[in-house]
Image: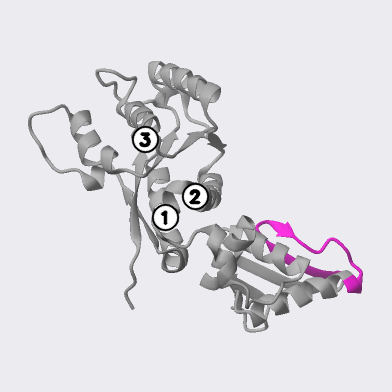
Amino acid sequence: MSYGADVFNVMIASPGDVKAERALVRDVIHEWNAVHSKIRKIVLLPTGWETHTAPEMGSGPQTIINRQVLEKCDLLVGIFWTRVGTATNEYASGTVEEIEKHVNSGRPAMLYFSSQPAALDTIDHDQYKQLTEFKQACRERSLYEGYDDLSDFRNKFARQLQITVNENKIFNSSGNTSPENFSSSIKSIPELSYEAKMLLKEASLDAHGSIMHIRYIGGTDIQTNGKNLINSSERRAIAKWESALAELVRLQFIAVRGSKGEVYEVTASGFTFADILSGI
């Protein structure tokens, strides 16, 4: 069934050496839409020069990109690894120009720098020097994020995109349901136990939204997001976490996926409620 929503353009700005990250940004945004757009009445539209520009004569390439994409952008995601990009008339690169002009307009930007290893013979040392200078300038006037590999980038961006959309006023000024207004929609939901809240929050940060319930001779594990949440072998402690699983299943925040009840996955309403828990 159709529903009304505000569309926000998310521009992906980067040099050409982070193509995999650009693809991951699009994947994460599409996942955010699938889980959150109906209740938030927001759709995030990933944009970039490769998908949202058309041939045009009469101006330089960067000027055309700025007019066709950047000026329509609500949120910018900037990503760097070893290159700063091709210089423009005013800036070290087109990507730098996009970031600077976007930030100067007062709109939000999320900036990421990769620390993945790179073969020395593939690095343009002049490019890397300019990138280092730009990174230093960013360090003095902004908060940016580093990441170690693609998995680390995906997890950080997915989590931080939720924070940005929940907290930045640009996403909460058009009549959509803001985190502050979520409380009215959850009054009928029973209060969750501490363990259930912690389990749902951690599972919502897991790359696959999965929970493993493992029983063995020496005890029991409940694992998600790379952690075992049961830190005791005492039956009383184990029972609390197993009760938390039952709470989340009863409220349909997680669903059983294993044939023996050993694997669970966070549902769409579970992801939504996890966001509510993070915002209250």
Which quadrant, please, contains the N terminus? Answer: bottom left
Judge whether residue 267 can be spotted in this image. no
Seen from the viewer's position, the closer of residues 138 and 227 is 138
Is 107 a magenta residue?
A: no
Seen from the viewer's position, the closer of residues 88 and 169 is 169
Residue beneath the point at 44% across and 22% down: 131
For label 3, the residue is 14
Residue beneath the point at 49% across and 36% down: 112
* Residue 3 relative to residue 191: left or right: left
Is the residue under label 2 in contact with that under label 1 (CB below 8 Å)? yes
Seen from the viewer's position, the closer of residues 20 and 6 is 6
Q: Residues within 10 Å of mark 3 (few under 14, many from 20)?
A: many
Is the residue under label 2 in contact with that under label 3 (CB below 8 Å)? no
Work out whether mark 1 precedes mark 2 in sequence or the reverse, and give the earlier one.
1
Residue beneath the point at 42% across and 47% down: 170
The secondary structure type at the circle numbered 2 is helix
Residue type marked 2: Leu
- The x and y percentages for residue 50 are 25, 43
**Mark drawn on residue 29:** 1
For label 2, the residue is 161
Residue type marked 1: Ile
What segment carries the magenta color? Answer: 218-236
Residue type marked 3: Ser
- The x and y percentages for residue 117 are 52, 32
Seen from the viewer's position, the closer of residues 81 and 173 is 173
The secondary structure type at the circle numbered 1 is helix
How many numbered marks appear?
Answer: 3
Give how far apart the Cα atoms at labels 3 and 1 are.
Answer: 17 Å
* Residue 214 relative to residue 3: left or right: right
